[in-house]
Amino acid sequence: MSDPDPVVPGGPERSVPDPSPAAKRPSRGRSVAAVICLVLAAVLTTPAAIAYWGQRTLNDTARYVNTVGPLVNSPEVQNAIATKVTDTIEQQVDIEAILNDVFSGVITDRPRLQRLVGPLSAAINGLIDRQVREFLASDEFADLWIAVNTRVQQSLQRLLEGDQTGAVSLQGDQVVLDVSEVIERVKQRLVDRGLTIVQNVPIPDIDKQIVLMEAPQLRQLRTIYAFANPLAQWLIVVVAGLYLAALILSRRRPRMTVIIGAVLAANALLVALALTVGRQLFIDALAGSTFGPASAVFYDTLLAYLDRGRQVFLWLGLILVGIGWFAGQNRYGTAVRNAVSGGLESIGGALADTPVGDAGRWVAANARWLRVAVGLLGVVVLLWGNDVSLSRLFWSLALVVALLAVVQVLVGAGRATAVSRAAPPAGAVPGTVK
């Protein structure tokens, strides 16, 4: 026996057709589009993050200099440069030969001469090393470091584009850093302190360079740079748009929020793996070279911005998972949500008879869009100035939570005000007109 046709309240009895199965089901095309957007965003997140780091760090002189600036105080970097400069000067200045020549006409006893030359040679070599290290610890070198690295960034960019001249250049099968200016400054300091024998010593160009990488690695970097550089600035925006499209197209947005959060956290782990592998390859490539002992600290400093981005990705993913769980139709999420919103609205209800109540009525009518605006404000705070960091993430999260709490309090005040004004005056009989 079939069920009776439904009756429309307030009107004549007439049959209403059952909703078709197609009408009950969400649009299949919309769901497929949401999945496609999510998959594309998941695949492109890690490449977009790396490309954006490269574009912002290697193409932006100010950011590059700010990134490598702290290396001037690194003991490993100072030691690598000091070793290179000291060895270069000592190799070109044979202190023992010069001392033997100076004292040969004064001291004819060869054993006595050797006993004198040895300590004097060691003392002069010690003076050279000490002057080099004092210079590297001075403000003069700090200023020179900024100037040199400004030229390094510009020449590195030209090198990636095919130009092989500048402070960083291609010599044979090696990419080298020119430290000739540091050597000349140290030589002048030694001359000023009376060691004039180094003044006119010629230094071969090959001894003024520190090897940074081998040419085959440069060819790979050029290929990546040529492909990624035009897209790097916008790829991260495209990825963010894909995540947003997936969220908007999804029929179950809390669940999609959880999935997006999990994808971001997974990509953060993937970036961490790439950084670890790249670090080891970089250290291995420079092992045995003058710059080898400083390779680890140089790599960590140069990629510090990307590593901070990875941490932000991880925490943002975890936060989105929590937000999706809080907004979802699960037992515990619903209980927590009802308790929090109910408590905030009860606070607003106590303010219904104040001017807050009138403002609350407008907020209650526009609460949905106000919440969206608060979320967008949090994104702007996070990304403002392109200085994404964990502290910035947590401050933006705190701002969003505080503003959403204020909105919910005002919603409670607005609803209580509407109810109190709709209620009949005390003592009035419903249905009568005075």
Image (spheres, rainbow, N blue to C red):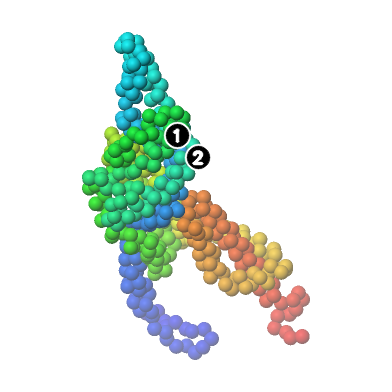
Counting from the top left corner in percent of width and height, residue 251 is at 40, 68
Q: Is residue 185 above or below residue 358?
A: above
Q: Secondary structure at mark 1?
A: helix
- Residue drawn at x 69%, y 67% is 356
Q: Secondary structure at mark 2?
A: helix
Report the amino acid beneath label 1.
Answer: Arg
- Residue drawn at x 27%, y 48% is 170
Counting from the top left corner in percent of width and height, residue 188 is at 43, 36
Mark closer to the observer (1, 2): 1
Neighbours of disc 2 within 10 Å: few (<14), some (14-19), many (20+): few
The residue wearing badge 1 is: 189
- Residue drawn at x 58%, y 61% is 403
Q: Is residue 393 left or right of residue 247?
A: right
Please name whichever residue, 315 or 213, is drawn nearer the observer in this view of the structure: 213
Q: Is residue 148 above or below residue 202?
A: below
Mark number displayed over residue 353: none
Mark 2 and mark 1 in contact (Cβ < 8 Å)? no
Q: Is residue 133 above or below residue 415?
A: above
Split into 4 quadrants, where in the image is the C terminus? bottom right
Q: Is residue 249 above or below residue 225?
A: below
- Residue drawn at x 71%, y 69% is 355
The residue wearing badge 2 is: 139
Q: Disc 1 and disc 2: Cα gap in Å?
A: 14 Å
Q: Is residue 383 left or right of residue 180?
A: right
Report the amino acid beneath label 2.
Answer: Asp
Mark toward the start of the polypeptide (1 vs 2): 2
Neighbours of disc 1 within 10 Å: few (<14), some (14-19), many (20+): some
